[in-house]
Image (cartoon, coloured by chain):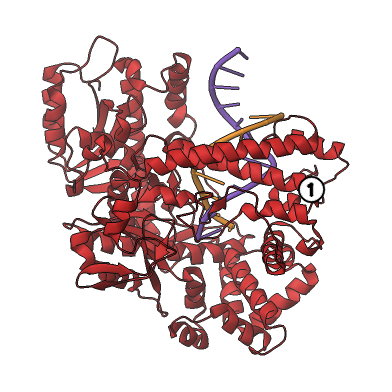
Chain colours: A red, B orange, C purple
Amino acid sequence: MLVTTIEEFNTATTHLSKYDEWVVDCETNGLYALQGNQLCGVGVGVDGATYYFPFRHQTLDSNLDSDLLPKLMEVMNTCKTIVGYNIKFDLKFLEKEGLEVQDKDLVDVIVMVRLTESTNVNALNLTDTLIRRYGPDAGAYDIETKQVLRKNKWTKDFSLCPPDILGPYCEKDVAGTARLYVDCKDKIIRSKQEKVWELEVDLTKVLYSMECAGVAVDNKYVESSLGKLTKRSKEVLQNIYEISGNEFNVASVAQVGEVFTSLGIRSPQKTLKGRDSWSEGALVQINHPLAGWIRQYRTLAKLISTYIEPYRGASTMHTTYANWGTVTGRLSSREPNLQNIPRNHFKLHDVEFNTEAEVTEIQGRVDAIIAAKGQNTSISAKSLRKDVLQVWGFVGDESLDETNDKQLAIRRMFKPRPDHYLVSYDYSQMEVRMFMNYIGNPDMLDLMKQEDVDFHGEAAKIAFKVDKDHAEYKFYRQLAKTITFGVIYGIGKDKLAGQLNTSPKEASKYKAEYFKNITGSKKFFDSVVRMVEQRGWVKSKYNRVYKVDRDKGYKAVNYLIQGTSADLLSERMIEVSKFLSGTKSRMLLQVHDEIICEIHKDDTLLIHKIRDILQENSLNIPLMVDMELCEPSWATKHDFEIADGKVVFEKKSSLPATVEEYLEWGDSPPITDKELVTSLDWS
DNA sequence: CCTGACTCA
DNA sequence: CATTTGAGTCAGG
């Protein structure tokens, strides 16, 4: 019911206070709680009853007195469990009003839906899920209201919508969430996924803390990068216009195609629909400087629009993690996506190749790109004109030279807060190790126990019976590596052939040899495929269930390996979070097999312990975590040691060697962050 | 194989 | 005319 008077408020809160599990849904004046948006009303449900409390609707009538919001939060704080749909969103708004999030169990029903849906289902939003599970009527009111909101241009700010329209909508969502909660819980119990569900409940709170903390951004670097990129992209654009003879929209694939066609150049590669492709994979194979310049322009445009513009003026970036976002159990990261920040640096100048060695070096790099992106081509970098090769020089590697102002790395924008170290923990070859864990081959397990083992080399020796002195050892090592990832990714013989640059027949032969000699690999693969064929699902070590089409068993192999790695990492993150609670240090980011932590100077002795926690596991193989110091930013990683409680690391290029020196040398202003104050338990 | 952001049509 | 949708491309694992 819509709560409009103080009497109704008192009756409602008296009723609610009897329950320790509340389903909540916030309506807000925008999507960004950490950037100043706030709630305009709260929907709450217990035991079949639902209420809507309007507080800040801009329609003049019928708001509740603003004093009642803190009162409602007071009652909400007495309950034990908060249930919601995509709950971290609502929590950020509720915490601003006084909810004590850290005390609560946080049940996200969208995560429960993920655990109880087939891997084919991707539309997990509330309306689609209600319709899918309970029929069209269950979602009709949602769809209707959204149309009204759209028609009145209220979609960006729900507080413009009167409570008598928004209230019932909110209550329907609360009721739908409650219904899904009950049904999903039943399904989770019947499929014996309670453990992985409990893992997700704990993970939700960990992710919530990471999102609220956010990562500090070097604004000066953002602004200087934007200037440099804009200048360079104009230069590149001029080059393109000169070569092509006319000005056109380089971002338009269609217009790029017209220009190439007018120059008499066809693409060696086709799109899925049979048109000429002008993708990177196609452009690498075109022996004309225009191809290189277009590729360079695309890169610069992408860097500006995706990785620079969104960061302007923000001293802290708060991503949103979706622990329901993937079918495997991995996280995804949105607004901004901090899981696909480029690793390599970029060069913003023409690169000259003078010596023979330099030419060979760039040829090698371009060949690698051709092999990776070009499908089944016989073209090699040796056949490319020198002026064509030259345009490729702008792609750098992971080592950024801070003193060179013609180099730029996006990861350079992310820096530690004052008095903190940024430390990255990186699992080495996590998915390969998980693959070996599932295979259970004792020889491989022994191999994995050695420190710094070259797995792909060893796999090549076993699979293809070559030793290190063999003339084609490098080829066989690459072959083994490609097949290992091919199996992990569940690719077929045609795609494998593309990657190996051979015929499908040859690819099948290599794969068969690999399967024959890596004992257990075929058995694992086949048994997963057979399980899916026979009963339509498989179950991981963490009891996560994957429902898969019966003819798509190969996918399940990937789900198991990728998903088990993800669940293991989630489990370890929960432990790290427990370990760091009450300290001045915290986890900030997760990139699938990497964790980035921000360690306070007083906490340096915790740094190694975090690695121990991450390496701990119940697999039959050890996991190795590489630990590096990111200084002065995420773009530069150093090996380091702790001596007398201080971090000591080796210089890279001609840069300051201690963090203190960096802070003086660096261009970053101290952080004055309003957003930060809102919702942090550690601030 | 698993993603998300941007751009164009 | 404004807004939504799908495809293509490319960044990460």
Tag count in the figure?
Answer: 1
Residue at figure coordinates x 78%, y 30% from the top left: A246
Q: Residues within 10 Å of mark 1 (few under 14, many from 20)?
A: few
x and y percent of residue A441 in the render?
52, 84
**Residue in the foreground of this view, choosing between A484 and A470:** A470
Amino acid at the residue labelled 1: Lys
Quadrant of image for the C terminus of chain A = top left
* Circle 1 residue: A270
A561 sits left or right of A171 in the view: right
Residue A388 visible in the shown view: yes
Is A654 above or below relative to A93? below
x and y percent of residue A447 in the render?
49, 85
x and y percent of residue A239 in the render?
71, 39
Q: Quadrant of residue A638?
A: bottom left
**Residue in the foreground of this view, choosing between A517 and A38:** A38
Label 1 resides on the chain identified as A
